[in-house]
Image (cartoon, rainbow, N blue to C red):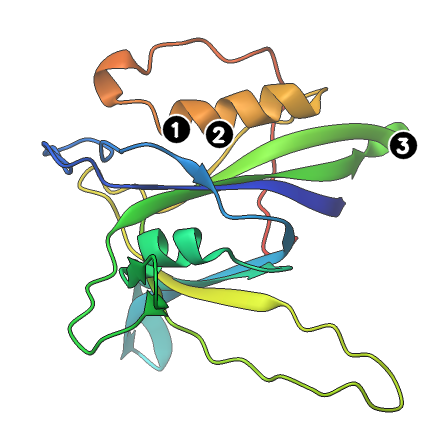
């Protein structure tokens, strides 16, 4: 039973050899996206069906792509510039143009969960290949009450060249172990042999 989410980290693909064949991507320097409020993801599947003798005789379901939403209390301009591909000018601020090209990157975060026996644990989530798109926002005046408005990053995620499109860690006893697991996802494949801490078997998560 998930009850919290923290540590939203994103990193762009590396400038050199970003997507090696048959492997996870290589990444540049990770950065924190800010204070996360909610993370949602939903895969889209291509399906094929065939009926014979009045029954479903053939069925195939293959991952196509997925959508994700990261809701944050606010997003600094420097983060928007890096994730959305917009220009950050010292004088004029953040500038979006029609020819902006949001970079591919990877996203990871950790979630807290309540296990059997009321034991508290943590696990990491990682999407190895995704791209963000700009999202509109509604602003409200100070009227009868104050409405605090968060910001949302909309992303489309797809499979890496080794076929991976989503990863979830085992359950860890501490937050630090889950954070370390996320950090390791951004390490280049040639250096990613660091051993994770002992952990319990994880289950799937759809929204935290």
Residue placed furthest toward the front? 91
- Which residue does the image show at 24% across and 33% down from the upper left? 24
Q: Which tag, 2 or 3, sits closer to the chain's start?
A: 3
Element carrying mark 1: helix
Q: Is there CB contact under 8 Å for labels 2 and 1?
A: yes
| Circle 1 crowding by C-alpha within 10 Å: few under 14, some 14–19, many from 20 | many
> Horizontal placement of 188 versus 201: left or right?
left
**Screen quadrant of the N terminus:** top right
10 Å crowding of disc 3: few (<14), some (14-19), many (20+):
few
Mark carried by residue 182: 2
Residue 113: x and y in percent read 74, 38
Q: Is residue 89 above or below residue 15?
A: below
Residue at (24% x, 42% y) in the render = 163
Answer yes or no: is residue 127 visible.
Answer: no
Q: Position of residue 112 (x, y in %)?
A: 72, 38
Write down the residue under mark 3. 118
**Closer to the camera in the image, 146 or 111:** 146
Q: Nearer the viewer's eye, disc 3 or disc 1?
A: 1
Residue 185, numbered circle: 1
Is the residue under label 1 in contact with that under label 3 (CB below 8 Å)? Answer: no
As measured in the structure, the alpha-carbon distance from the residue carrying label 2 to the one carrying label 3 is 25 Å
Secondary element at image label 2: helix
Q: Is residue 7 above or below residue 61?
A: above
Residue 32 in percent (x, y) is at: 50, 41
Disc 2 residue crowd, few under 14, some 14–19, many 20+, Cα 10 Å? many
């Amino acid at each position: 039973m998930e009850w919290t989410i923290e540590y939203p980290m994103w990193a762009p693909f590396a400038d050199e050899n970003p997507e090696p064949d048959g492997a996870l991507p290589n990444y540049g320097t990770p950065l924190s996206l800010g204070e996360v409020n909610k993370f949602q993801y939903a895969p889209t599947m291509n399906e094929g069906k065939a009926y014979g003798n009045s029954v479903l005789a053939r069925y195939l379901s293959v991952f196509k792509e997925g959508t994700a939403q990261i809701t944050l209390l606010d997003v600094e301009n420097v983060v928007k510039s890096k994730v959305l591909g917009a220009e950050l000018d010292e004088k004029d601020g953040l500038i979006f143009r029609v020819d902006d090209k949001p970079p591919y990157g990877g996203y990871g975060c950790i979630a807290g969960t309540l296990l059997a026996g009321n034991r508290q644990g943590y696990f990491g989530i990682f999407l190895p290949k995704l791209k963000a798109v700009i999202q509109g926002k509604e602003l409200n005046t100070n009227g009868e009450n104050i409405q605090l408005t968060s910001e949302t990053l909309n992303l489309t995620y797809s499979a890496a060249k080794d076929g991976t499109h989503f990863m979830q860690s085992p359950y860890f006893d501490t937050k630090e172990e889950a954070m370390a697991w996320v950090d390791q996802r951004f390490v280049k494949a040639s250096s990613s042999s660091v051993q994770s801490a002992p952990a319990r078997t994880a289950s799937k998560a759809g929204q935290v």
